[in-house]
Image (cartoon, coloured by chain):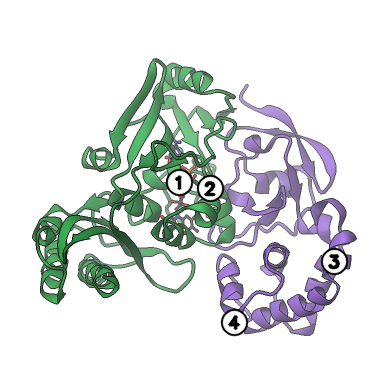
Amino acid sequence: MAEYLLPDSLSEATEIIAEHGRALAIVAGGTSAMRCGTCRGKHGRGILCLECPGPRLVSVPNAAFVMGIQRLGLDGVAPANGGLGFGAGLSLSRLQASAPIPALRAAARQVGGPALRNMATVGGNIFERQPYGDVAVVLLALDASLTFAERDGERSQTLAAFYADGAKQGGLLTRIDCAAPDGEVVFLKCGRRRFNSPTVVTVAVCIALDGGKVRRARIALGGAGAHPMRCAAAEELLIGAALDPTSIAAAAAAAADACDPATDVVASEWYRRRMVATYVRRALGEIEQGS
Amino acid sequence: MTAKILSLNVNGRDETILCDGLTTLQEVLRDQLGLLTSVKDGCTQGGCGSCSVLVDGELWLSCLAPVAALAGRAVMTLEGLKQSAGIAAIQQSFIDNSAAQCGFCTPGMILTVKALLDANPEPSHDEILEALSGNLCRCTGYLPIVEAVKDAAARLSGGADAARASEGREG
Ligand SMILES: Cc1cc2nc3c(=O)[nH]c(=O)nc-3n(C[C@H](O)[C@H](O)[C@H](O)COP(=O)(O)OP(=O)(O)OC[C@H]3O[C@@H](n4cnc5c(N)ncnc54)[C@H](O)[C@@H]3O)c2cc1C
């Protein structure tokens, strides 16, 4: 039995977090946190249920308290400083309908089916286990930053630093912000079927060209390591180079080398690594074609 | 004591329910309110769509929704919608196109089609496939279902306004 808390304000929410610490689980849309195995939640939800004979699933381990974020007003779109800003509680269907960048809309649209997207949030997607986090991969290519609410104020961190740290930073995520992209952004998902597919790998690239040469490159991968990751080796190869089949092939090979995908029921490590190369090549190719 | 009492509007009626932090909407509809068995207990992982309901008119998966977050919101199951003209046309299209075999996925399918046609009265083939992508059927192979959706769209586009007007609050 877990007690459900539905605070009405951020100050109330941060008090709850400070008071309950590890005994508290934050649940946004619940599409990951509320899943359960054949025990029908008897052994917990969103946890790796070792007692269940059937499908073992991973979410709210031993939480005595569950906090909902629905009344915190985090479901809006609020651009700050000419950039893009999303509340952590914004649903993926609203992101799909309203995000100003096509790549973000495309990523949201490819998460689950329509009912799932009505519930699932952008914030929840950032904490999602690999290979998921499709939207987070685009946000990483946009060099987004996260804002967490704390009892004595706010704390910000780049999404890249958050993942490089092992996504350990706890607390209540309130917003995700990024500057308006300078450059082209492309998102591609490698799945097993056209709609509502589990993720094999995802790739998001943000490339700025200047006089035919790459001035800025951000390449983000999902399903390719413990967390969504930037691919510095591939980015460095591109910067200063012309975006052509040779540089694209080199970047794709560097990405495949640098990643460290897992084997699961969706795909093997072997297959994912090859798909990283293929999809990085395709994503950069789209930008080359369009330039 | 961690259980809470809250009120929830289900199929147009205010209901008082007892829940804890992890009680799902699906459990409440099936077990506490009894007999709302159009809401199926399928995968409990959000993967099959057979537990679909409408929450304030939006399609949701009741197996993943912590019910405690829904205080004061309006939930519609197929039982609550079955009198409406739109639903009757979709049901008839499913019957006429042999789109139901064992019937387990059918209530979720019909709610999904209702949500689709409310938002997009003339969906393309691809839009239908995308809209149904969260609902699994293990019998029909989907073709009859897609045909039924096209048929329902055609039936409703004739009298769409009339159908919606007769649906009242959930339209
Ligand atoms: C059938 C199915 C298909 C799916 N397909 C995809 C897919 O294709 N691609 C994909 O990326 N994902 C997929 N998912 C995973 C998941 O639905 C999404 O990633 C979703 O965005 C998670 O958001 P949520 O709001 O439901 O998170 P929740 O389940 O509510 O929370 C997930 C985690 O994030 C934490 N959290 C959430 N919000 C906050 C916050 N504001 N502050 C701090 N912590 C927070 C929670 O504590 C929890 O640990 C799928 C899930 C299902 C069930």
Q: Earlier in the sequence, mark 4 or mark 3?
A: 4
Q: Name the tint of chain B in the rendering.
A: purple
In-image side of B9 versus A109 (left or right) = right
Where residue B123 sits in the image (x, y, percent)?
Answer: 65, 74
- The CB of the residue at mark 2 lies under 8 Å from ligand 1: yes
Image height check: is A213 above or below B148? above
Tell me the residue at 35%/30% (across/down): A170
Helix, strand or loop for disc 3: helix
Q: Are marks 2 and 1 in contact (CB under 8 Å)?
A: yes
Q: Nearer the viewer, mark 4 or mark 2?
A: 2
Q: Name the residue that disc number 2 marks.
A: A91
Cα distance between the residues tagged 2 and 3: 29 Å
Chain to which mark 4 belongs = B
Residues A234 and B55: in front is A234
Q: Residues within 10 Å of mark 4 (few under 14, many from 20)?
A: few
Q: Earlier in the sequence, mark 2 or mark 1?
A: 2
Q: Which chain is green?
A: A
Tell me the residue at 23%/38% (across/down): A161
Cα distance between the residues tagged 3 and 1: 35 Å
Where residue B152 sits in the image (x, y, percent)?
Answer: 76, 76
